[in-house]
Amino acid sequence: MKQSELSKILDQRWEELWKFSEERERILQKSHSKIIKLLASTPLPTEYGDFTYMVFGDYATGEFHNAVIYGNAKKSIKKNGMLVRVHSSCGTSELFHAMNCECREELDEAMKRIRKNKSGMIIYLNQEGAGNGIAPKIKAYSKSLVWKGNKVVEAKDKNGKPITAYEAYKMLGYKQENRSLLAAAEIIKFLGIKSVRLMTNNPKKIDELRKYGIKVEPEGIHIKPNGDIVKNSLKAKAKILGHNITSKDLK
Ligand SMILES: [Zn+2]
């Protein structure tokens, strides 16, 4: 078999798997079945204090999600008004300290606030690239970042405007927001939490958790952008996704 034929079959297979996973999530959602299962839990010392670390399996997607709860979860979970950040994975910034998005700074800020509050939880969902997956994310980055000599700069469209990752998703036919908070909602319910103070600027996250029956009191999360690429990313989030970004966030 030629390499190109094999590649075509693999692409097709991937497409089928992806559709199947979406379908499975829809069925599970309709049938109100639990989609998550606690697989393991441990105390964990961190720079931000001692936490309880939990790992959950997600039956809808086959992914693993993580939750870190400040203190001993057996005693520290607040049923009402728990400070929570629902955070989607971003390996480029969180592992490799990439400087074209604000994910790592936001995660860091959320951990600091939890430490200051002496209570709280991060739900860390494994959904890269606005929920499209790691390969689509890297494809989108390849449209929005280019080499200029030895330096990486933003790609510009023909009008000279920067092409953000969000615009690149659209150009490539992906959704600009394809994340699901179903697993996060299930984790919150599993822990017996009825209402949360949610650290987010994203109105969709608030609406979605409310749709799943969780009371949400929004609290913004603000970081200092480390350069123009992040500023443009925040502007795109405000314009395209309706995130609550103020001029203060862009300084
Ligand atoms: Zn990111």
Image (cartoon, rainbow, N blue to C red):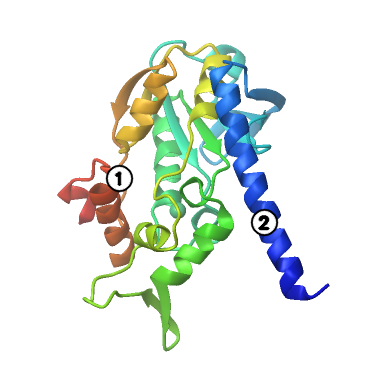
Between 246 and 144, the residue placed more toward the observer is 144
Q: Which residue is mark 2?
A: 12
Position of residue 102 in the picture relative to residue 126 (left or right): left
The local secondary structure at tag 1 comes to helix
Q: Quadrant of residue 219?
A: top left
- Viewer can see residue 66: no
Q: Quadrant of residue 24?
A: top right
Few, some or many C-alpha atoms within 10 Å of disc 2 (few <14, some 14-19, many ≥20)?
few
Number of numbered callouts drawn: 2
Q: Quadrant of residue 218?
A: top left
What residue is at 68 percent from the left and 23 percent from the top?
Answer: 37
What residue is at 57 percent from the left and 37 percent from the top?
Answer: 22
Amino acid on which the number 2 mark rests in the picture? Gln
Question: Percent x, y for residue 38?
Answer: 68, 23
Up/down of 89 relative to 143, above or below: above
Between 132 and 173, the residue placed more toward the observer is 173
Up/down of 147 relative to 225, above or below: below
What residue is at 53 percent from the left and 49 percent from the top?
Answer: 128
Q: Which residue is mark 1?
A: 241
Question: Percent x, y for residue 109?
Answer: 39, 42
Closer to viewer: mark 2 or mark 1: 2
Q: Earlier in the sequence, mark 2 or mark 1?
A: 2
Question: Percent x, y for residue 47?
Answer: 54, 41
What residue is at 44 percent from the left and 11 percent from the top?
Answer: 194
Question: For the residues marked 2 and 1, what is the alpha-carbon distance in whole angstroms?
Answer: 30 Å
Quadrant location, the C terminus: bottom left
Quadrant location, the N terminus: bottom right
Amino acid on which the number 1 mark rests in the picture? Leu
Do labels 2 and 1 touch, CB within 8 Å?
Answer: no
Which disc, if any, is residue 111?
none
